[in-house]
Amino acid sequence: MVDDASAPMRHPGIEPAEQAAALLASSGMPRMQSRVLMALVGSPDDGYTAADLADRLGVSAAAVSGAVRNLQAMRLIQRLSRPGDRRDRYDLSDDVWSGVITANVPLYAQLGALMHRIADENTDAPVSTARAHESAAFLSFLAERMPQLVAEWDARADGDAQDPDASVVPS
């Protein structure tokens, strides 16, 4: 089979990627970063070049460049090099989602502790105090459980990797 570099690149999952990007953008992630991140979920195994991403997203190379730079700084994506190819390629970082979630554990713990302190000083508002304590307890629970959940996931994924007939995706 001859590799035809002039053939248009196939971009799988465009519609769900755009929907997922819209979800991320609605939760506060900049729109272009969201779109690049979700496009990389459907990237070929050797990643996308900046030009590939610009083509897939229908945007300028400059827009992709800024998004890629920010996503790399957040360690959500990685730059890949291929021998003999001067163009950088990009793909998701390994274990990106567990890394993002566990990176926030210290934030959850600190925020929970501070919210408890706020509630403790708000003695004249019992409804507000109860709500703050409940929110703080939830954040403390997340801080405690997130590392355990990631460990459980890793064990499950490792077990499934050893059993080719198993799937980490629940049926």
Image: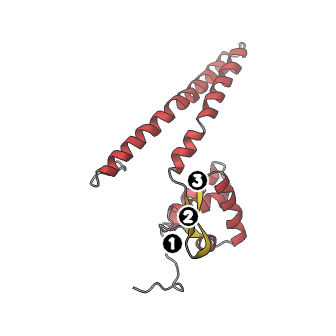
Residue 155 location, quadrant: top left
Instruction: Indicate which disc, 2 or 3, sits on the residue closer to the N terminus.
Output: 3
Name which residue type carries label 2: Ala
Q: Secondary structure at mark 3?
A: helix
Q: CA distance from mark 2 to mark 1?
A: 8 Å
**Where is mark 2, residue-wise?**
39
Q: Position of residue 77 (x, y in %)?
A: 59, 57
Q: CA distance from mark 2 to mark 3?
A: 14 Å
Instruction: Indicate which disc, 2 or 1, sits on the residue closer to the N terminus.
Output: 1
Residue 21 location, quadrant: bottom right
**Where is mark 1, residue-wise?**
11
**Where is mark 3, residue-wise?**
23
Residue located 57% across and 45% down the image? 100
Q: Position of residue 81 (x, y in %)?
A: 58, 67
Q: CA distance from mark 1 to mark 3?
A: 20 Å
Residue located 68% across and 15% down the image? 120
Q: Are marks 2 and 1 in contact (CB under 8 Å)?
A: yes
Give neighbour class at mark 2: few <14, some 14-19, many 20+ (Cα, 10 Å).
many
Residue located 50% across and 64% down the image? 42
Name which residue type carries label 1: His
In depth, the one of 156 and 170 nearer the eye is: 156
Give neighbour class at mark 1: few <14, some 14-19, many 20+ (Cα, 10 Å).
some
Name which residue type carries label 3: Leu
Left or right of residue 114, residue 46 in this image: left
Q: Of tags 1 and 3, which is closer to the observer?
A: 1
Residue 171 appearing in the image: no
Q: Secondary structure at mark 2?
A: helix
Residue located 59% across and 53% down the image? 76
